[in-house]
Amino acid sequence: MIQLPFADRAEAGRLLATELLRHQLPANVVVLALPRGGLPVGLEVAKALGAPLDVVIVRKLGVPWQPELAMGAIASGSFQTLDEQLIGALGISRAEVDAVVARESAEVARRETLYRRGRRALDLHGRTVLLVDDGLATGSTMLVAARYVRSLKPRKTLIAVPVGSVQACHRLRQEADDCICLATPEPFSAVGEWYADFRQVRDAEVQSFLEQETTLPAFQKQ
């Protein structure tokens, strides 16, 4: 039985790793964390599995006058999805959509450069990919990440989070080979309510987590 709230993302990551070890994942598994909150969780999982850690960067495309309302999302490599029905219903022009896409594409590129520091993205073709975040509320961001990863032809795409809403975890099981949620408490309004410490993860911390991964002993990386 998982006791909520988690102390912090690192504790959640260790508990998630314990569960994942029971699944006997293949040796070629790759851990992809969603920045920024997914990195502390992903690092603990990668260390426990002896797997390489990388990031998959996803940005919401917000409605111009209501940025919190998503009209789509964009992921690393200029992969994007658009909610054409919503865009049409709200009368959002193509120029307005293009402006939001351009702005968020620039932010994706900035983060790619900042986080990787010249390191190339991992080759996912034929490998088992484990997508990790600190939780799922609506699951929209993870949905785009999963679709992006599947476009790179991995052998399997798995999603793993410490906590998520029942609806989001069910939704993601339709988009991946499996979605592992340690806890699905109800009612569920926000991921942060299930963490005692849910402070914002800074860019510098993301860099530090990725650098820690590069210092893992070679025998730990399959």
Image (cartoon, rainbow, N blue to C red):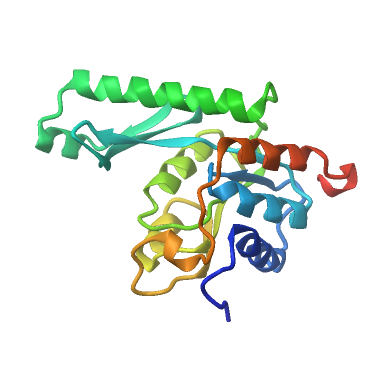
**Residue 151 placement, left or right of 23:** left
Residue at point 33% right, 73% down?
187
Residue 64 locus on image (x, y percent): 21, 31
Res 99 quadrant in image? top left
Which residue extends farthest bottom?
Answer: 1
Q: Is residue 220 left or right of residue 17?
A: right
Q: Is residue 150 above or below residue 182?
A: above
Q: Is residue 65 left or right of residue 122?
A: left
115 in relation to 176, above or below: above
- Image spot of residue 66 (x, y percent): 21, 39
Horizontal arrangement in the rendering, residue 183 relative to residue 95 (left or right): right
The structure residue drawn at horizontal position 27% and vertical position 20%, both measured from the top left corner, is 98
Q: Quadrant of the N terminus?
A: bottom right
Which residue lies at the image location 76% right of the left edge and 57% below the top edge? 48
Front position in the image: 71 or 12: 12
In which quadrant is the C terminus drawn? Answer: top right
**Residue 39: x, y in percent?**
61, 47
